[in-house]
Image (cartoon, rainbow, N blue to C red):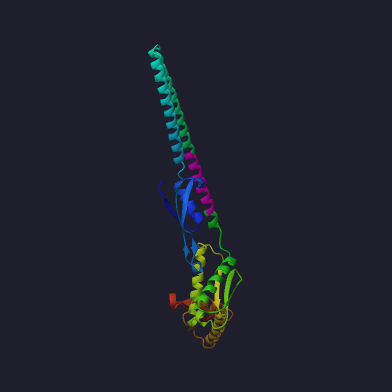
Amino acid sequence: MEWIETTGSTVDEAKDRALDRLGIAEDDMQFEIIEEGSNSLFRLKRKEARLRARVKPVNTRLKQTDRRSRTKKQAGNNKRSSGNSVRNKNKNSQPQKADTKGKNQKNLKSNKTSTNVTDASKKRDNDMQSSKKGNHRSNSELKKSVSGDVKKNTMDLEEQAEITEDFVAGLLEKMGLQARVVSSIEDNRAIVQAQGLNLGLAIGPRGETVRAITQLSHTMIQRLSDGEAEGKLTVDIGGYRERRRTFLAEFAVNQANEVLDEGQSVALDPMNASDRKVVHDAISEVEGVTTRSEGSDYDRHVVILVDETV
């Protein structure tokens, strides 16, 4: 039988796919591993395992044995036939009917032997087909059961924190920066922090680089969990996010007080969603003012207004 090629995230998965395609049991399959699966840097890209397989050639020896048996039988028949011929020449007194009867008995025995061999061959083929169908159904049902279980499982916060720790540590090392990466779980959120000196390269102007690292971490977790990740994830480099949160909260309160004194609304500069949330939360503690977000995309910003309901 011709070879087929299958792939999978692991060698076992590639073997399962080959068994499904061939419809046989694992003992009946011959396979060769072409390439083993592996993860690339930071687990962002996975290299699949690849193998080729075919049905194990098990009938060759049986056919050779059958041919040898038939050859031996024919040789034996020829010897017996020669002996009968000699005896018939020496004994001309036997009637022709006796010779005909002997030939008929030999033919009956030969036909009976051929019929038994054919029936045994058919029975063996039927048993092999039944075994293949049963194994194919078992493999398919097991695969469906396993895939169903995987879909129900979600990646917990501890696993997210561990994976993100490895990713951030490896990324900073590639950037030539030295930092201690730690993680914690707070309020259904995994927080990964890189602590150290001279981490400005990983923070970037106005925190653009640390936001990019955070986005990469989110994308990696979503791919590895197939979109089934619980809670939220935060990445902080050199304490930038905490300093930014403190600064924004103080700035927002000062702006709110000016709105109260002057009685005029103030529109702040465009901010990302996390910064806008810090501003909304800080001003919610100031009586007499309220906030709302206006604009879209990169122009979305916070507007502080006098609360006329007070």
Residue 132 sits inside the magenta stretch: yes
Extreme residue in the front direction: 90
Q: For the image shown, how many numbered marks are present on the structure?
A: 0
Q: Nearer the viewer, residue 98 or 187?
A: 98
Whether residue 22 appears in magenta in the rendering, the answer is: no
Relative to the observer, which residue lies in front, 73 or 255? 73
> Is 287 left, or right, of 174 in this rendering?
right
Q: Position of residue 83 (x, y in %)?
A: 42, 21
Q: Nearer the viewer, residue 252 or 99?
A: 99
Residue shown at the point (40%, 23%) measured from the top left: 82
Q: Is residue 34 above or below residue 131?
A: below
Q: Main secondary structure of the magenta part?
A: helix
Residue 91 falls in image quadrant:
top left
Residue 309 seen in render: no
Tell me if residue 11 comes above or below residue 257 in the rendering.
above
**Image quarter (top left, top right, bottom left or bottom right) of the C terminus:** bottom right
Q: Give the residues drawn in magenta, as a range.
A: 128-146
Tell me if 10 is positioned left or right of 97 in this view: right
Comparing 214 with 97, the one in front is: 97
Residue 162 in sight: yes
Spot occupied by residue 97 in the image (x, y as percentages of width and height): 39, 13
Residue 145 percent across, percent down from the top left? 54, 51
Q: From the viewer's perspective, is 101 left or right of 220? A: left
Residue 85 image position (x, y, % from top left): 39, 20
Q: Residue at x 51, y 51 (%)?
A: 143
